[in-house]
Structure formats: C-alpha cells, structure tokens
Amino acid sequence: MGGGIYNSYFAEDGTYEDASGGGNYEITEDGVCYPDTDYGCYAAEINGNQLEWFKDGESVGTGMIEEGNTLQ
C-alpha cells in the first residue's frame, strides 16, 4: 500500500505480520481493523484473487491474494 510493493500475512489466530513487524487484527463490519494502533480499519473489495483496500471510502491500494505466508 502507499504505491510500493507490500506483503502481509494474516494468520487464522488473529495475528498479522508484514515487513514492519506485526500485531493483532480483527475482522469487523468496518473491515480489517488493527486494534491498539494508529492504522484504524480498512475495507476490502475482493474479486477472485484480486484485492482493493479502502480507507474512509477511498482506494488506498490494490493487491493479489496468495495462499500461505509469502514472507517466509
């Protein structure tokens, strides 16, 4: 997100990891939320394996959904 290449992994136990570290996430009616951070919530529009992230109703990035942890 933010115009560059970005990878993140969302585990079934409610944790995520990315290049800057990781933490906890929750799925709510607002989308993917990152409690106890300044990130807030992001809605996602998914079409097959294509993903578009939205913050406050505006597109903030696109990506591709892959299986497994691509960070390892």
Image: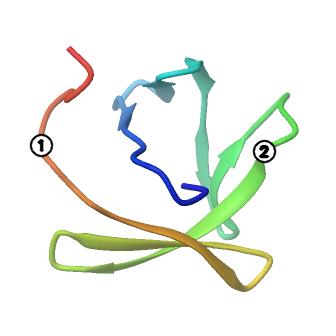
Give the quadrant of residue 37. top right
Compared to 70, does 30 lie above or below?
Answer: below
Q: Where residue 39 is drawn, which disc sits there?
A: 2
Q: Nearer the viewer, residue 5 or 17?
A: 5
Residue 5, position as x, y percentages in the image? 39, 47
Amino acid type shown at disc 1:
Glu
Colouring method of the image? rainbow
Calculate the distance from the C-alpha at mark 1 to the C-alpha at mark 2. Answer: 24 Å
Q: Identify the residue at image location x=42%, y=43%.
A: 6
37 left or right of 22 in image: right
* The C terminus: image quadrant: top left
SS for dot 2: loop
Q: Quadrant of the N terminus?
A: bottom right
- Looking at the image, which residue is at 41% across and 24% down? 13
Q: Residue furthest front?
A: 4
Residue 31, given in percent of the width and then of the height, sits at 61, 64
The residue depicted at 47 percent of the width and 51 percent of the height is 4
Report the disc number at residue 67.
1
Query: Which one is earlier in the sequence, the residue at label 1 or at label 2?
Result: 2
* Image position, residue 40 (x, y; %): 80, 50
